[in-house]
Image: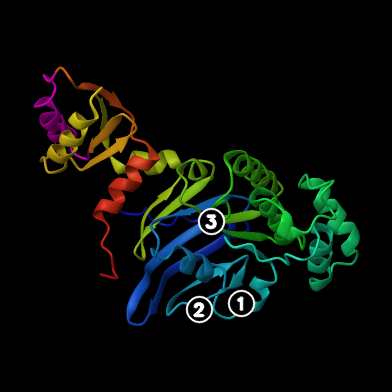
């Protein structure tokens, strides 16, 4: 599935607009000929396997890393010649907690406020603490916080200087589902206020919370659009097959994986998702197994995870 052409929109509505970006390390193309646009005030998700070029792409989009070739703008500034102006408008939250463990919540936020030259850092810190639900934990040391509370503190520090663009590099790794949901509620509130967010994630439910997504595998942009658009563009027809006997499903997985007309077989609990891009060929392959009483076949909609598994199966690892 090829990525759709970049559309034209009013410049004032576009936060990022880049063309033909390429970046090579040690003779290997980590990102190849990438073009894309990100609208202002949207949450844009980057998905792909480890080493696929997600972080490198995000850094080039925002002027934090210089591409070997290609052009573009971020927040209206040239990513090649105006990088300092871009950096001053960016908040960057990494997967690893990067604030001071031996300072309190309040002290960390006030320190960030002073670093960025905020006129009243103490007042700004108090406002962030209240907005992020950290009230009552102001004097707790950052190193004593749980993963979810550390995440809130890190988000508060990133957004304290009121950036126009927020970069989130797998921000919810290692936190519980409730903390992840609370975090995403806050991200949507920030986007509603006009903040543009770029987020890399491995979680399919988080991808579905993004306004648009891009799937990158080994340096190539393979799919882009809303979740519905990406699923539709995959042209996958999918069946769910279940059985009370797990050994039957294990054998069936081996048989179907090499069957003509079947492009993807993936276990999901006590069932398999079986998909193909050629509907007629898939129907012919499935027909051979419909008469088996121990198997229950039902047509189903392709999920985002089905699409990404299929894309991965077609992607070529450029480090092999």
Secondary element type, mark 3: loop
5 within the magenta span = no
Q: Split into 4 quadrants, where in the image is the C terminus?
A: bottom left
Name the quadrant containing residue 236.
top left
> Which label number is shown at residue 66?
2
Q: Which residues are magenta?
A: 276-292
Q: Position of residue 136 (x, y in %)?
A: 84, 46
Mark 2 to mark 1: distance in Å? 9 Å
Mark before the other along the chain sequence, 3 or 1: 1
Residue 174 seen in render:
yes
- As drawn, 256 above or below 198: above
In this picture, residue 88 sits left or right of residue 241:
right
> Which label number is shown at residue 83?
1
In this picture, residue 272 sits left or right of residue 58:
left
Q: Position of residue 100 (x, y in %)?
A: 73, 67
Secondary element type, mark 1: helix
Q: Report the residue at 51% width, 65% height from top.
A: 58
Secondary element type, mark 2: loop
In this picture, residue 2 sits left or right of residue 225:
left
Residue identifier under label 3? 170
Task: Single out the mark in the foreground, 3 or 1.
Answer: 3
């Amino acid at each position: 599935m090829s990525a759709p052409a970049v559309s034209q929109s009013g410049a004032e509505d576009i936060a990022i607009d880049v063309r033909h970006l390429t970046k090579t390390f040690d003779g290997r193309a980590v990102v190849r000929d990438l073009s894309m646009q990100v609208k202002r005030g949207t949450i844009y998700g980057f998905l792909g396997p480890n080493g696929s070029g997600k972080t490198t792409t995000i850094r080039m989009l925002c002027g934090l890393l210089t591409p070997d070739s290609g052009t573009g703008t971020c927040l209206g500034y040239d990513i090649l010649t105006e990088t300092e102006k871009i950096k001053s408008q960016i908040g960057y939250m990494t997967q690893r907690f990067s604030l001071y463990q031996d300072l309190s919540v309040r002290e960390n936020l006030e320190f960030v406020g002073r670093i960025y030259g905020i006129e009243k850092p103490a007042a700004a810190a108090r406002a962030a603490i209240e907005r992020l639900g950290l009230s009552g934990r102001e004097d707790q040391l950052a190193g004593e916080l749980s993963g979810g509370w550390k995440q809130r503190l890190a988000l508060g520090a990133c957004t304290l200087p009121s950036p126009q663009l927020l970069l989130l590099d797998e921000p919810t790794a290692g936190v519980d589902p409730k903390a992840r949901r609370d975090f995403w509620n806050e991200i949507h509130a920030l986007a509603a206020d006009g903040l543009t967010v770029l987020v890399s994630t491995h979680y399919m439910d988080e991808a579905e919370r993004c306004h648009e997504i891009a799937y990158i595998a080994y340096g190539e942009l393979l799919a882009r659009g809303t979740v519905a658009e990406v699923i539709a563009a995959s042209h996958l027809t999918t069946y769910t097959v279940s059985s009370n006997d797990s050994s039957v499903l294990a054998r069936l997985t081996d048989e179907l994986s090499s069957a003509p007309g079947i492009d993807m077989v993936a276990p999901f609990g006590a069932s398999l998702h079986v998909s193909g891009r050629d509907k007629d060929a898939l129907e012919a392959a499935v027909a051979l197994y419909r008469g088996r009483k121990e198997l229950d076949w039902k047509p189903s909609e392709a999920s985002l995870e089905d699409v990404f598994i299929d894309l991965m199966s077609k992607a070529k690892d450029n480090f092999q």
